[in-house]
Image: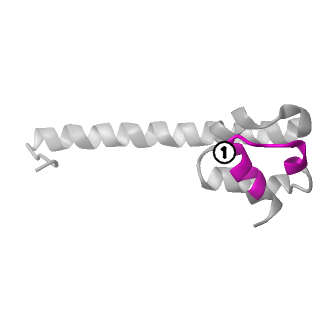
């Protein structure tokens, strides 16, 4: 397990130390958080005193992208369900 994965797991578990922030490739860490779609969760858990403002901005930017994509998907889902209802299709049967 690399340093980025260890920090990621420590943040999820809630048992992070300052040592966990050492030797982190922040670009790789951000990619990992984005891949798992939990940049919002990670942003809240990170110790902002131990990372750069640039990294925080990158995480927040990706979080906005994830939120936007989720809103688009949600609207598509609602549209689909409306169409199913019009055609009297019950997906739960």
Viewer-closest of 88 and 22:
22
Viewer-closest of 16 and 5:
16
- Whether residue 5 appears in this view of the structure is yes
Viewer-closest of 78 and 30:
30
Seen at 39% across and 38% down, the residue is: 74
Viewer-closest of 20 and 68:
20
Q: Secondary structure at mark 1?
A: helix
Mark 1: few/some/many CA within 10 Å (<14, 14-19, 20+): few
Q: Is residue 37 left or right of residue 91?
A: right
Seen at 55% across and 37% down, the residue is: 67
Residue highlighted by disc 1:
13
Q: Position of residue 37 (x, y in %)?
A: 59, 48
Quadrant in which the N terminus appears: bottom right
Q: Position of residue 35 (x, y in %)?
A: 62, 56
**74 magenta-colored:** no
Main secondary structure type of the part rendered in magenta: helix
Seen at 65% across and 51% down, the residue is: 34
Q: Is residue 6 left or right of residue 41?
A: right
Q: Position of residue 57 (x, y in %)?
A: 79, 36
Total labels drawn:
1
- Whether residue 28 appears in this view of the structure is no
Q: Which residues are magenta?
A: 6-21
Q: Which residue is the extreme one toward the bottom?
A: 1
Q: Quadrant of residue 62?
A: top right
Q: Which residue is the extreme one toward the left?
A: 88
Q: Position of residue 45 (x, y in %)?
A: 72, 36
């Amino acid at each position: 397990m690399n340093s980025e994965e260890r920090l990621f797991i420590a943040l999820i578990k809630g048992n992070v130390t300052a040592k966990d922030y050492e030797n982190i490739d922040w670009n790789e860490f951000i990619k990992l958080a984005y891949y798992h779609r939990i940049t919002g969760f990670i942003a809240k858990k990170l110790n902002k005193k131990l990372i750069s403002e640039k990294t925080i901005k990158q995480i927040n930017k990706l979080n906005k992208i994830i939120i936007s994509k989720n809103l688009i998907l949600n609207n598509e889902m609602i549209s689909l369900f409306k169409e199913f209802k019009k055609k009297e299709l019950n997906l739960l049967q």
